[in-house]
Image (tube, rainbow, N blue to C red):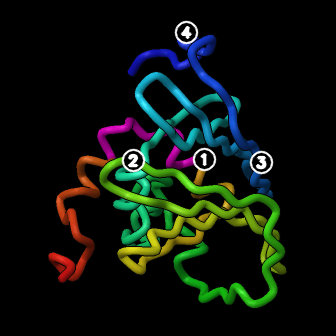
Amino acid sequence: MTDPTESAHYIEIDEETVVRGDDATVTVRRIRTPKGERLELRTDDDVLRADALGLESLSWQDLDVFSEFLGEDYALAERSESDADDTVDCEFTLSNEYADIVVRSVESPDGDRLIVEAPKKQFSIRVDAEGLAALAAQDTSIFSAFLETPHGPGGHAH
């Protein structure tokens, strides 16, 4: 994977927020690159950029996938959280010819979360800072694995 800082002068930051947890802090950005809009997850050590289609494929993953990244049980996967008490810190959309995604950074009673929602597919995923940091440490090829079910876990959308 190339060092994303090498191409920093080709990037425009449209939105930026920070998701904080006990063990991680992740800067979340909506950026524009010569190849289109991306979501950037940045920690002190890692950077991952994903387009709308990659994020759509993330939206239908089971939270247990983060256990694989972390090498331990992902605590968030064991809880059921309500969004009723969320305060939206930042919200933006990412789009390309294949997918439209809504990204929300929220403050909840349980801590900061990033919600990645694919409204047309009716899937969404809530991830905390530790999960986002684990995702940021992955290679972008992880989205290819997610896309092995390109229309979500239920197959082709009608």
Mark 2–mark 3 Cα distance, whole angstroms, equals 22 Å
- Mark 1 lies on a secondary structure that is helix
Q: Pick out the residue farthest to the front.
A: 97
The Cα–Cα distance between marks 4 and 1, rounded to whole angstroms, is 21 Å
| Residue under pointer 4 | 6
The residue that disc 2 covers is: 96
Q: Mark 1: which amino acid?
A: Ala
Q: Position of residue 100 (x, y in %)?
A: 44, 59
**CB within 8 Å, label 1 to label 3:** no
Eyeballing the image, is 139 above or below 70? above
Of marks 3 and 4, which one's residue comes earlier in the chain?
4
Region of the chain picked out in magenta, as a range: 133-142
Q: Nearer the viewer, residue 82 or 21?
A: 82
Of marks 4 and 1, the one in the foreground:
4
Mark 1 to mark 3: distance in Å? 14 Å
According to the picture, the residue beneath numbered tag 1 turns out to be: 133
Tag 3 residue: 17
Name the kind of residue labelled 4 in the image. Glu
Residue 104 appears left or right of 154: right
